[in-house]
Amino acid sequence: MSMTITEKILAAHAGVASVAPGEIIDCRVDFVFANDITAPLAIREFEKMGVSGVFDPDRVAFVLDHYVPNKDIASAQQCKITREFVRAHGLPHFYDIGRAGIAHVLLAEEGFVGPGDVFVGADSHTCNHGALGAFATGVGSSDLAAAMAMGRLWLRVPETVRYEFLGRLRPWVTGKDLILAIIGKIGVDGARYGAMEFAGETLDDLTMDERFSITNMAVEAGAKNGIMEPDERTLAWVAPRLRRTFTVYRSDPDARFADMQTVDAGALDPVVAAPASPGNVVPVREAAGVKVDQCFIGTCTNGRIEDLRMAARVLAGRKVHRDTRLLVIPATPAIYRQALQEGLIQIFLDAGAAISTSTCGPCIGGHMGVLADGEVCVSTSSRNFVGRMGHRESQVYLANAGVAAASAVTGRLTHPSDVVGELVSV
């Protein structure tokens, strides 16, 4: 039976020859993780089960990334619960302050996920890892507790829609713009419980950083997972990192898709998702001129080294507008270190940006960038729902790092070329 890449991975992990959309399967998982918000809930449910330990200590990780460094007593208690559980069970893969980064970037960087895996996390943006050719999806804390105990999880096989990108990207257009363009077209529920399979010639020119941005936001269209078939670039990225063997799966040429859509990527200009939905997508130039109080470059969507390089290209030799704040948060310590070595951090400091240790912080309105009543932020994050980054009367525009940096310089929502000048290849 012909299958998509998602169906092949799930069939292999369910121990059956084939699966079809809609089937309920009992499936082996390769790796599970939780963060400082979701771990305490999973731990509580795990302890109710009365099991002696996790299914495999080498396949479980905890990453403290949302409210760290702790913003208050409640968040400190959350982290304490997680630390005590890790110590009690002797779990080796624990990432605390100083070692921790944003989980979705860190765990791939550390080699815990690879092609052909079933990778589950108690966080919705776990679909990030589909860029490596893995079935990666977010689950609830109770489901994660079961997976921690048994190494298995039940899933409904999603139907797959294939999105094919055509054309070469224009300057300042990134993977973030590609996924926003799709969400703007199909809506935030347009891929509900589906598998979004991304393909096409455009991907050949995209780095892994840009590919991660695309699969990371599949959940913003309601998808169960986003996925790409591994190519030579994927395998070259995985080879020095992955801690175990892997299997590459690809969709059969005659695989059955629920739908197939093409995206003229070469015609796109940078876009933003205007308040208050990731689906409210318009070209940057249509929204240009909106007064901006804060710009934020970071998160699991766009806190990677190439995002920082793009921002630095805009900011070099320029200053953040006096009425605007700029926050820059590298997604992991390794990215922070690389940004230091490349001189990017110096550029941000010279421009007047505030730079933080790796944390999710502002993305969820947690700390280190909470918005006040009526304030506007241009953010490289993934969500701009009402109250997402602070006060319910604040507003968030989602954009790529170049747009965020340009807006920080002018104090208004701005296309990068209007700051840098003549369009150049980025």
Image: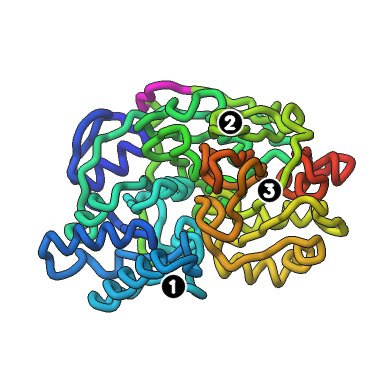
Compare marks 2 and 3 and give the one earlier in the sequence. Answer: 2
Q: Pick out the residue farthest to the front.
A: 373
Count of marks overlaid on the render: 3
Q: Please indicate whether residue 60 sits to the left or right of residue 99 in the image.
A: left
Q: Position of residue 194 (x, y in %)?
A: 37, 31
Q: Residue at x 12, y 65 (%)?
A: 51
Which quadrant does the N terminus fall into?
A: top left
Which quadrant would residue 204 be assigned to in this image?
A: top right
For the residue labelled by badge 2, is the local secondary structure a helix, a strand or a loop?
Answer: strand
The CA distance from mark 2 to mark 3 is: 21 Å
Label 2 Cα crowd, 10 Å radius (few <14 / some 14-19 / many 20+): many
- Check if mark 2's residue and mark 3's residue have beta carbons within 8 Å: no
16 and 28: which is toward the camera: 28
Say which residue label 2 marks.
165
6 and 390: which is toward the camera: 390
Q: Is residue 257 magenta?
A: yes
Dot 3 amino acid type: Ala
Q: Residue at x 83, y 40 (%)?
A: 417
> Is residue 405 at least partly visible in the picture?
yes
Residue 204's place in the image compared with 143, above or below, is above
Which quadrant would residue 185 be assigned to in this image?
A: top right
Dot 1 amino acid type: Asp
> Is residue 240 at least partly visible in the picture?
no
Dot 2 amino acid type: Phe
Say which residue label 1 marks.
96
Bounds of the magenta segment: 255-260
Q: Is residue 59 magenta?
A: no
Compare marks 2 and 1 and give the one earlier in the sequence. Answer: 1
Label 3 Cα crowd, 10 Å radius (few <14 / some 14-19 / many 20+): many
Say which residue label 3 marks.
401
- Check if mark 3's residue and mark 1's residue have beta carbons within 8 Å: no
Which quadrant would residue 31 be assigned to in this image?
A: bottom left
